[in-house]
Amino acid sequence: MAVSSTELGTLDIKKLLIKQSVPASIGILFMSINILIDTIFVGQWIGALAIAAVSVVLPITFLISSLGMALGIGGSSIISRALGANNKEKALHTFGNQIMLTLSLALVSVIVGLFFSDEVLLLFGANGAIMLPAREFFIPVLYGVPFLALSMMGNTVIRAEGKPKFAMIAMIIPAFSNIILDVVFIKFFNLGMFGAALATSISYFMCFVFILWFFIYKSELRFQLKHLILNNKIVSEIASLGFVTFSRQGVVAILSIILNHTLFVHGGEDSVAIYGIISRMLMFALFPILGVTQGFLPIAGYNYGAKQYSRVNKTITTSIKWAAFLATVIFIVILIFSEPIVAVFTKDAKIISETPNALRIVFAASPIIAIQLIGAAYFQAAGKAIPALLLTLTKQGFFLIPLVLVLPNYYGIFGVWISFPIADILSTLVTAFFLRKEMKQKLTLAQDGI
């Protein structure tokens, strides 16, 4: 049974976190499986070079679609707090503004992408033989990106309403449709990279159709045309909070550019393909931790808006404990089963031999990342844009990018892989310091009436 927005402030935290996190985790799992199987299909049916091409293109499309995610998460923080404060009109106006901003920015980005496709692909690392399959994949996927952006925006609003099961279904639909269409277009019609791209775009559209149906028939946010008119104050608040998410995605895009070029210089197309496999595993294996983080956001945001700070404190500690346990289990599985996991993706002997050790190194610090993820999410849920932005950027922006730029010059490809756990450890230490300070000085004192 779905959780109503008012229940976010009354139900037991553990039960509430399960109700919010399990559907979010399942949705992220299916989204990750979709990307994972997509990579397996192109690797087995087209070739290792196709994995490298997908690794170049996906960060571009995710960067554009992350406009929707950014506006969704920024607006959803406002919506959660507005519902917690019983201000439904502000929630409705925020949602209407989210729609207009997402649609406008996504369309502009797609037009720019179409006009400068080769330049964008080269920037993101489509070097050498990677360019041809990357171009073939990029253009058709680009047409589906506005639907993905609107879907990502809508999905966060659904969770802010306290209806995570619908958000889960919205993520499952494109996963199933993309897998089926991949088989049809790549295996049976032999359309290669174009077929993979066509399947991806159609799956984005199907997700959008479901989310549109939800807001017409199931949502409590029954906005009117007047709510679509942009309000400067609301737009500014959405942008300041959404900028946190978009900045993170922007830094991820910059990281992808640096990684693809660095890997190509030190190891050629094969190293880019190896990272393609590792990055898919990062998205797939961490799904329960990301699910807990997504489940945490509306609970923390609602209770912060309702000034129930003891519940916010309990939500933080419970979420970190659960996510840390799950991350430890994932690390153990990766440690033991690296070889068979890699063999699923490709038949290329060199990639099969070199990837498992790299995979273990990249995941080495995963048991502690829960603190970093939940800590950054708390500041976003509380509407504190600047600390949320800084903490969100610590891993990729402040630590990982500089490490990737420096260490490979001394240690080659190993320098790339070891940069990941070092960045995880440093960013977790920084986040833990600020989160502990906030919980002691702000939340504890506030709940005591000081």
Image (cartoon, rainbow, N blue to C red):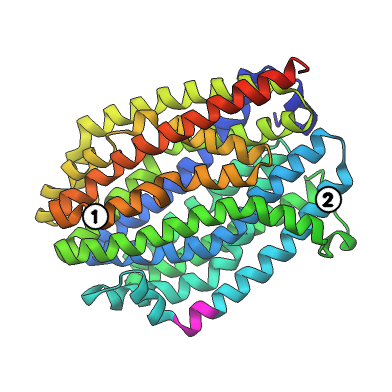
Residue occupying image coordinates x 38% and y 29%? 368
Badge 1 density bin: few <14, some 14–19, many ≥20, Cα 10 Å: some
Side of 275 where 319 appears, left or right: right
Q: Residue at x 39, y 80 (%)?
A: 119
Q: CA distance from mark 1 to mark 2?
A: 48 Å
Q: Nearer the viewer, residue 169 or 156?
A: 156
58 is within the stretch colored magenta:
no
Q: Magenta region: which residues?
A: 112-116
**In the rendered image, which residue does mark 1 sit on?**
406
Residue sitting nearer the eye, 58 or 420: 420
Tell which circle, 1 or 2, labels the residue nearer the N-terminal end: 2
Q: What numbered label is drawn on residue 92?
A: 2
Of the 4 image quadrants, the one containing the C terminus is top right
Task: Report if the CB atoms under discs 1 and 2 are less than 8 Å apart.
Answer: no
Image point (58%, 25%), residue name: 316
The image's mark for residue 145 is: none
Residue 288 in view here: no
